[in-house]
Amino acid sequence: MKIRIVLLAVLLGLCGGKWICTGYAQEEDWTWWNELAHWDGHTPWQYYYTYSPRYFGPNAFPVPKMGDGKVPENLVVDAAVEQYWGYGDNATDLNLRIDIPLYPKYVNLAVWMVPVEYYNTSIHVRNERLMRTKVPKGFAVGDVYIQTGIQILRDRPKAPDIMINLCMKTAPGGPLTAARYFDTPGYFFDATIGKTFTFEKTKYLRSVAVSGRAGFLCWQSIRADQSMQDDAVIYGVRVGLTTNHWQYEVDFSGYQGWEHNGDCPMVLRAQVCRNFKKGNSLYFGGLLGFQDYKYYAVSIGYRFSTALKLFERKNSK
């Protein structure tokens, strides 16, 4: 009896091993891609990609969102579901962000990422990007962004609010075969100058905020035979309006890369936010892409804000 069991186990193992090996061999059969990309037989397949927003997914290196020139003074937790449509590239994702006030009103730490993204692209887009995913749909994981915001000027009667952002993009996103994320590090820094005008005597309108941004953005590419990185100039303008319970904002932003290989995305964003009690908010957003950002999107999100003081200057007695 024991011998029969052993023989059965060995037989199943061999059959299973054959199935696994067959599946592995099929997975590693890149004949279709070699013909599509006209592979020369020795160049790494990563070199055939074009590492720019035009030839990757909508979250590869999106245009950074704008603020009003003020560092957030509260702990803010933000979660949103986003739906993107493009020229044959559809994606649904979850976007998470947390803002931590290290020194309220002056220094802030922000971390955000897309922990999960479902994509479904057309065969035309797959071939255009030379994706090494034969069936161009599935799940991907996004990159992690870590940003520090520093307030230079704030709430001066005759001077604008000025803050700078220093942000690092890590590279856990992937898989690279699906051409959703660059799988390379990057960073950006910018300065935002804004002014908030308050209206205390009006019944509904509380404030209007106007701001502008300029900065530098950079990411690494894998093309060792060409430039190893792409540099870009960030720009943007924003207008925000706040009433008793609602917030409205619209911004036009983008960045201009120097390689001109699809590295010049532009976006027009709008958001409507309803503020509730105890720091709870619900918002709806829309996005329209231009130039090298061939997407439009809608989003719905929840935001929670509460006071948190990790480091605070103590008044001397």
Image (tube, rainbow, N blue to C red):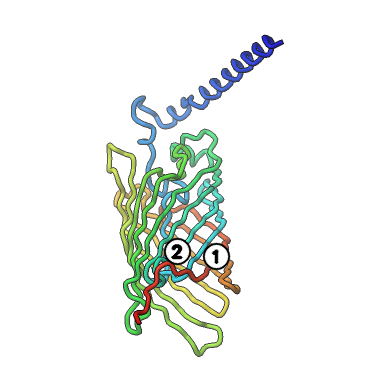
Mark 2 Cα-neighbour bin, 10 Å: few <14, some 14–19, many ≥20: many
Q: Nearer the viewer, residue 261 or 207?
A: 207
Q: Nearer the viewer, mark 1 or mark 2?
A: 2
* Quadrant, the N terminus: top right
Going by the picture, which residue comes out furthest to the front? 317
**Which residue is drawn at the image coordinates 35% and 50% (left, top)?**
186
Kind of residue at badge 1: Arg
Q: Residue at x 44, y 51 (%)?
A: 144
Q: Secondary structure at mark 2?
A: strand
Q: Nearer the viewer, residue 244 or 77?
A: 77
Spot occupied by residue 237 in the image (x, y as percentages of width and height): 39, 69
Q: Quadrant of residue 278?
A: bottom right
Farthest-out residue, right: 1
Which residue sits at x=65%, y=13%? 6
| C-alpha distance separating marks 1 and 2 | 14 Å
- Amino acid identity at mark 2: Ile
Q: How many marks?
A: 2
Which residue corresponds to mark 1?
303
Q: Nearer the viewer, residue 72 or 221?
A: 72
Name the outermost residue toward the bottom: 201
